[in-house]
Image (cartoon, helix red, strand yellow):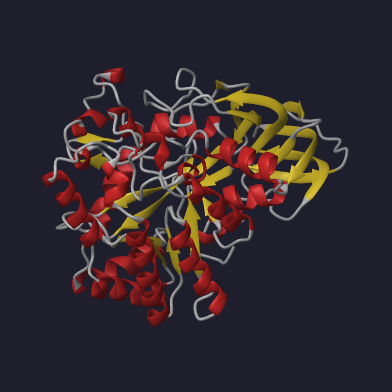
Amino acid sequence: MSTLLIRNGRIITATDDYVADVFVEGDKIKLIGANLQMQSDRAIDATGQYVIPGGVDCHTHMDLPVGAVFSSDDFETGTIAAAHGGTTTIIDFATQSRTGSMHAALDEWLAKAEGKAVIDYGMHMIIANLPDDLLGEMDALVREGVTSFKMFTAYPERLQLDDGTIFKAMQRAGANGGLIMMHAENGSVIDYLAQKFIAEGKTTPNYHPLSRPHQAEADATQRVILLAELAGVPVYIVHVSSHRAMEAIRAARDRGSLRAVYGETCPQYLWLASEDYADGKFDGAKYVCSPPIRERANQEPLWRALAADDLQTVATDHCPFCMTTGFKGLPKQKELGRDNFRNIPNGVPGVENRMHLIYQGGVIQRGWTLNRFVQVTSTAAAKLFGVFPRKGTIAIGSDADLVLWDPNRQHTIRAATHFMRVDYNPYEGVTVDGSPSRVIARGRVIFENDQFGGKAGQGEYLKRGTYASP
C-alpha cells in the first residue's frame, strides 16, 4: 500500500485553519499532526501553500446528447480538466427518456463513464416522465446510491413536467430521503417569446437572453419553492442566474416555512454578462446557456448571496460545445444555430476554472475567508449530496482528495492551454492569483505543476448517501 506525507501545509477546511502534516496510506487520510515522523514512499513539502479538500462540482454534463450533437467533453477529457483546476469529484446527470425507465438511463450514463473518469463521480437522475408505475424506481435508486432527482419547469418538448408531477415526485422524495433539484424557468413563456422573436426575424444570439427574462426564472423559482413547502420537503434550485430568483430563495429561508431550500450558482453568472454579446454577432454563441447570462449589475448580488449563505454552492453546469466545425474531429456544434438562436446548443465550459474563479472573485477581490471558499466549492456540495465526510473535508478516514493550493502561483486562463475539449474559453485572459501546484485524488498525485500524471479509469463511481444540511 503506497504512502504519502505532505509536510508543513496550511490545512484549510470549511471550519479549520492550522499548519500540520498529513499522512496518507493508500487512498485514505491516516494521520494529521505536527511534525509527523513517518516513513513514506513520497514526501511533499507544502510550506507556504494551502492544503484544501478537493473540489466537488455537483453539476456537470459530460457526453450529453443535445439534438444531433453531444457536449464536447466526455468523462475522460472532462474529468482531466476538472482535476487540473482542483476538482476531484463530480456529480453528473443520467437523463431519463420520455418513454424509458430511470434505471435504463443510469445504466447508459454509467457506461459512458466506465473506464474513462480520472476522478470519482456520482450520478443524479433527471426525471422526464413519472407515471405511477415508475414511482418505485425512485425508492430503488435511493437505496442504490442515486439520492437526488432533477426536474424541469422548462423545455416543453423534452423535459418540462407539470406541477402535479413535480409535486408527486417531491412527496415520494419526502418518503425515501431523496433530494429534489429543480431547473426553474417558466418554459411556456420562454417558448412563446422565442417563437415570437424568430417570427420577427430576430435570430441572432443576443435574443437568447431576451427570450428567457429574469422574471421567468423568478416566477418558476417561487412556484417550486411553494410546491416544496406544500410537500414538506427540501428543494435545491440549480444554476441560479438572477438576483430575483436568489431573493425568492432567501425569502423562503428567512420566513422559516422552508429552511431547507438551497441554491446553487455558477461562475458564468458571477463573471460574465449579457453585455458581452449584446452586439448580435455570432461570436455571442459562446455565451449561450440556460438560464442565460444576465446583465453585469446582476453579478454583485449573487456574490453577496454566496458570502451570506443565501446561496450555498458554486457548481459549473459544465456543458461545452465547440464554435469551429471539425475541432478535434467533433461535428458542427454552436454553428448549428447560426441562422436561429434556438438551435445553438445551450451550454458553456467551466469545470476546469471554477476553483480559480471563485478564489479570485471571493478571496482575493472580496475578502472571503479561505473557509468560505472551501465551503462553497467543496464541503456544502459534499454534505447536500451524500458524500461527506468521505469527500469535502480533511479528516482521518476521509478520502485523500487533496489540493495543494499555492497562493503565489498565478494562472492565466487560455483556451490554448486548457484541458477541456472545447475550442474557446469564456474567461479567456483572466489571470488569477492562486492555483493548484498539485492535485491528489484518493492518494494519487494526478496533477503536478500543470502536468497530468493520472490515467483514465482511476475514478470510482460513488454510491451516495442521503442529503445533510450544509
Percent x, y of residue 457: 43, 33
Residue found 82% across the figure and 46% down from its top: 18
Residue 469 appears in which quarter of the rendering? Answer: bottom right
Q: Nearer the viewer, residue 86 or 205?
A: 205
Q: Is residue 416 visible?
A: yes
Q: Nearer the viewer, residue 91 or 443?
A: 91
Residue 344 appears in which quarter of the rendering? Answer: top left
Residue found 50% across the figure and 74% down from its top: 252
Q: Nearer the viewer, residue 146 or 317?
A: 317
Percent x, y of residue 340: 17, 37
Viewed as shown, does residue 188 lie left or right of 116? left
**Residue at the farthest left position:** 199
Residue found 41% across the figure and 35% down from its top: 276
| Quadrant of the snapshot with the C terminus | bottom right
Percent x, y of residue 29: 69, 44
Viewed as shown, does residue 89 lie left or right of 6? left
Q: Is residue 390 visible?
A: no
Viewed as shown, does residue 309 lie left or right of 349? right
Percent x, y of residue 205: 27, 37
Q: Count up the numbered dots.
A: 0
Q: Is residue 302 above or below residue 247?
A: above
Residue found 79% across the figure and 40% down from its top: 10
